[in-house]
């Protein structure tokens, strides 16, 4: 059996500022037993449109809504209506609201309109227990009908793109499982000097190979168009998500990019013990609140977990880029998870790599040991409003003198008027052309 990673999108509805309950749910769910769930957190004050569009792009199995100030019945009704209108009523909805939701009257109405479960204050494992029990399955037993996928991906169908990226992530899990089984078999041969390929193991390897071959067959039908890939990397807390959001805003505001599409792949770490993840990069994204729906149709964002892949990238990142290029996305931004000194994997899969630093990089020896400082196409000293930031930027320029002149200072704020961020966008555009 290869367990499918359950993707659970959580959000606090518009007009509701209470985040304590949803924070607890996020923490407990991602670390649930040995079967952690991948939680995609949107944050508070979320509109129905953004919740639904995000859930579709993330290919979430279900949406978890937090409501503390009331208004939950009307909000849920409109959210379910929009899911149905977009052909996405395969995404379920659960809600929790403490004492705001009447356990008799309100719950009956909510369940009647299609809400799958209503949660109240109680055991911390109630939500993850429900999710794991009802949405856990074996990816090898899922019906995999890929006949029309290539055509729909070429047409830019968002639901198909999102579902196929999930299938690519499942394929990576299958490849991992296949490798583990063959490795165990090889070790057994060394110890016993004989091959013990029993019927059960043989049948499972055949199922895995069949699954992988079917997915690879669909990939071969794709015809990628020209697309430019930019990778943003750096340690956790350096401002990668905020800069990614601002670069997306510059791209969408650029008259040269009218009618062109942009994609964002944002990676966060998987927890080794549970296998779960908190995919929280969407909480930093403000572009959905700035642009109208016509422009937002040109944006696709997907949160991904590393799932054991080193270097701050995801297992299925290369295949996902291939799919997005085939769907006609002109520019693709990859934001890695936080990285260490020797993590430079992003440089091998992008056209332009951007290394984001902060003034607190350590001493001279720590600086020299950082491989991305020398491998990146652009080095950004972020948070220039901090003490000693100008001195840190001067040290970086001196260290890279004659090696890299693309060194930029930025201020990590939600401010498109920052000259450094404008310069960063123009530098990426210049390197592309």
Image (tube, rainbow, N blue to C red):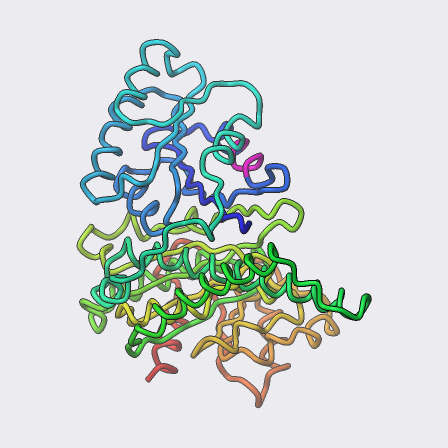
Is residue 383 visible in the rendered structure shown here? no
Q: Residue furthest top?
A: 104
Q: Position of residue 79 (x, y in %)?
A: 26, 34
Q: Quadrant of residue 63?
A: top left
Which image quarter holds the C terminus?
Answer: bottom left
Q: Please, which residue is most extreme toward the front here? A: 199
Q: Is residue 246 above or below residue 282?
A: below
Instruction: Please tell me whether residue 368 is drawn above or below residue 57 in the rendered image.
Output: below
In this rendered view, identify the residue nearer to me: 37 or 429: 37
Using residue 307 as the reference point, say whether residue 185 is left or right of it.
right
Extreme residue in the right direction? 191
Identify which residue, 274 or 295, lies in the foreground: 274
Residue at the (49%, 69%) spot, across then down? 409
Residue 177 colored in magenta in the image: no
Residue 3 on image: x %, y %: 53, 48
Would you say the magenta stretch is mainly helix, strand or loop?
helix
Q: Residue at x 38, y 58 (%)?
A: 245
The image quadrant of residue 301 is: bottom left
Using residue 13 as the reference point, say whether residue 296 is left or right of it.
left
Image location of residue 423, percent across then percent down: 39, 73
- How many numbered marks are there? 0
Q: Is residue 416 visible?
A: yes
Judging depth in this view, the residue of 158 and 285 nearest the camera is 158
The image position of residue 122, as x and y in percent, is 54, 18
Q: Which residues are magenta?
A: 24-29
């Amino acid at each position: 059996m290869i367990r499918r990673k359950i993707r659970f999108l959580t959000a606090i509805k518009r007009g509701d500022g209470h985040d304590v309950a949803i924070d607890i749910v996020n923490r407990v769910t991602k670390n649930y037993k040995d079967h952690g769930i991948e939680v995609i957190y949107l944050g508070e004050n979320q509109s129905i449109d953004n919740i639904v569009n995000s859930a579709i792009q993330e290919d979430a199995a279900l949406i978890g809504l937090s409501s503390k100030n009331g208004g939950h019945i009307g909000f849920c009704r409109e959210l379910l209506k929009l899911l149905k209108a977009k052909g996405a009523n395969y995404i379920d909805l659960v809600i929790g609201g403490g004492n705001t939701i009447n356990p008799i009257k309100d719950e009956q109405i909510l369940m009647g309109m299609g809400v799958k479960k209503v949660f109240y204050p109680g055991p911390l494992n109630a939500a993850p227990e429900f999710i794991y029990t009802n949405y856990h399955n074996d990816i090898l037993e899922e019906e995999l009908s890929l006949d029309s996928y290539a055509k729909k991906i070429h047409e830019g169908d968002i639901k198909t793109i999102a579902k196929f990226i999930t299938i690519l992530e499942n394929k990576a899990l299958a490849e991992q499982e296949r490798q583990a089984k063959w490795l165990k078999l090889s070790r057994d041969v060394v110890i016993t000097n004989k091959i013990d390929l029993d019927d059960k193991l043989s049948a499972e390897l055949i199922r895995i190979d069949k699954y992988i071959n079917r997915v690879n067959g669909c990939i071969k039908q794709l015809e990628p168009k020209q697309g430019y890939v930019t990778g943003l990397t750096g340690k956790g807390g350096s401002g990668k998500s905020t800069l990614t959001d601002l670069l997306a805003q510059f791209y969408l505001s650029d008259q040269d990019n009218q009618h062109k599409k942009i994609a964002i792949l944002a990676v966060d770490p998987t927890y080794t013990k549970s296998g779960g993840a908190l995919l929280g990069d969407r909480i930093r994204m403000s572009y959905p609140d700035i642009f109208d729906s016509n422009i937002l149709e040109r944006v696709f964002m997907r949160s991904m977990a590393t799932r054991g892949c080193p270097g701050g990238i995801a297992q299925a990142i290369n295949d996902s880029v291939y799919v997005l290029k085939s769907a006609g996305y002109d520019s693709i931004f990859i934001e890695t998870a936080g990285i260490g000194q020797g993590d430079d994997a992003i440089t091998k899969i992008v056209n332009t790599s951007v290394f984001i630093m902060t003034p607190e990089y350590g001493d001279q020896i720590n600086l020299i040991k950082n491989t991305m400082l020398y491998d990146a196409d652009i080095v950004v000293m972020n948070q220039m409003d901090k003490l000693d930031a100008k001195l840190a930027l001067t040290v970086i320029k001196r260290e890279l003198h004659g090696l890299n002149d693309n060194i930029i200072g930025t201020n990590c704020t939600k401010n498109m008027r920052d000259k450094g961020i404008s310069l960063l966008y123009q530098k990426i555009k210049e390197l592309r052309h």
